[in-house]
Amino acid sequence: MQEKDVGISKGDTNMEEKIVIVLNEMSEYLSITQMKKLQEVIIKTFADNEASKVEISNEEFLKMFLDAKRIEGCSERTIIYYQATVKHLLSQITTEVRKITTEEIREYLSKYQKWNNCSNVTIDNVRRNISSFFSWLEEEDYILKSPMKRIHKIKTKTVVKSVISDEGIEKLRDNCNEKRDLAIIDLLYSTGIRVGELVNLNIDDIDLEGRECIVYGKGDKERRVYFDAKAKVHLKEYIDNRTDNNNALFVTLDAPHDRLKISGVEIRLRNLGKKLALERIHPHKFRRSMATRAIDKGMPIEQVQKLLGHSQIDTTMQYAMVNQNNVKTAHQKYMA
């Protein structure tokens, strides 16, 4: 095996010598064919490494990661959250991304929690975002192993979040002064759609006769959801009384009747809830209420998952808070 045949650039004599040593050491264990293959692999590997030695800054890695997430279909809101989380990490840990250690990240997370006096739920969300960044680096072969693999999920207290009671829903309905708001409440309560999906709906997406509509969820995933008779009646009344030409399903009450924004829905529901002394009324509470009602009434969890547009059934289970009264009734039925 001649040294001049190894194929590494002439300037890197030290590397060339090391490769020759490896080949010489292995020559007595491998056949000629195997030796040739080993030489090809070594040359290709080191050539690729040389080519990849182009310096990539931490900021460039972050930009590449965010671009990848956009291509995957993440919403702009999620992209902004990723960006803020990882950017803050990189502002505190100045080490080159490919050399950041598990210990550095552990220390950062500990300090972050102290600085912001945040809950375990919040710090675990930060951990998940950072983990996603390093997992991407690993998948793209920028690092051998993610430093997040030894940082496990942070334990959080299981809090049974409240849902909107039947009485609460009736109060909200009875105190709506606008047909639009009544239609919003009934559509949210019967479909369990996300508020972002609600405001993106167009009139053309609604099939009143079939009592169904097409929504576009996270990652622009299309799914069909269904609404009840009350929602149908109130939607029809609202649409029939519209005088504008906007194709958006829900628009502002005042001219020029632009598409309603998420914040508009949130503020409207929050104010109505406060007026009626109902506990924290917000769009997501309707979603949780729908999931809980569906499971309490015996709908299979897989079907609830499909209606809510969850990719993981574990996510659906978090929404499916079991009604304690139903537990008591079941105990009396089966155990008494």
Image (spheres, grey):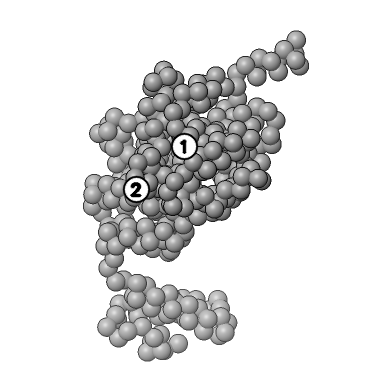
User: Residue at position x 69%, y 36% from top?
Assistant: 300
Residue type highlighted by circle 2: Pro
Using a 10 Å C-alpha cutoff, classify the residue at mark 2 as few (fewer than 14 neighbours), some (14 to 19) or many (20 or more): few
Q: Mark 1 or mark 2, which has the lower sequence index?
A: 1
Left or right for 72, reference 293 = left
Q: Position of residue 333 (x, y in %)?
A: 75, 15
Q: Are marks 1 and 2 in contact (CB under 8 Å)?
A: no
Q: Which residue is mark 1?
A: 180
Residues 134 and 44: in front is 134
User: Foreground residue, 279 or 304?
Assistant: 279
Q: Is residue 162 visible?
A: no
Label 1: how many Cα within 10 Å (few below 14, some 14–19, many 20+): many
From this viewpoint, which residue is outermost toward the top?
Answer: 336
Q: Quadrant of the C terminus?
A: top right
Task: Inspect this view and state whether residue 270 appears.
Answer: yes
Question: At which x and y percent is residue 249?
Answer: 48, 46
How far apart are the two marked residues, 1 and 2, measured between alpha carbons?
16 Å
Q: Position of residue 196 (x, y in %)?
A: 45, 45
**Residue 140, placed above or below residue 213:** below
Q: Residue at x 30, y 86 (%)?
A: 10
Give the number of the disc on residue 310.
none
Q: Position of residue 204 (x, y in %)?
A: 54, 53
Q: Amino acid at mark 1?
A: Arg
Left or right: residue 322 versus residue 277 is right
> Is residue 105 depicted above or below 41 in this figure?
above
Determine the residue positioned at 27% across, 47% down.
88
In the visual, does 249 lie left or right of 120?
right
The quadrant in which residue 280 appears is top left
- Disc 2 is placed on an element classified as loop
> In the image shown, does 166 or 60 lie closer to the viewer?
166
Task: From the image, tell me which residue sits under label 2.
Answer: 256
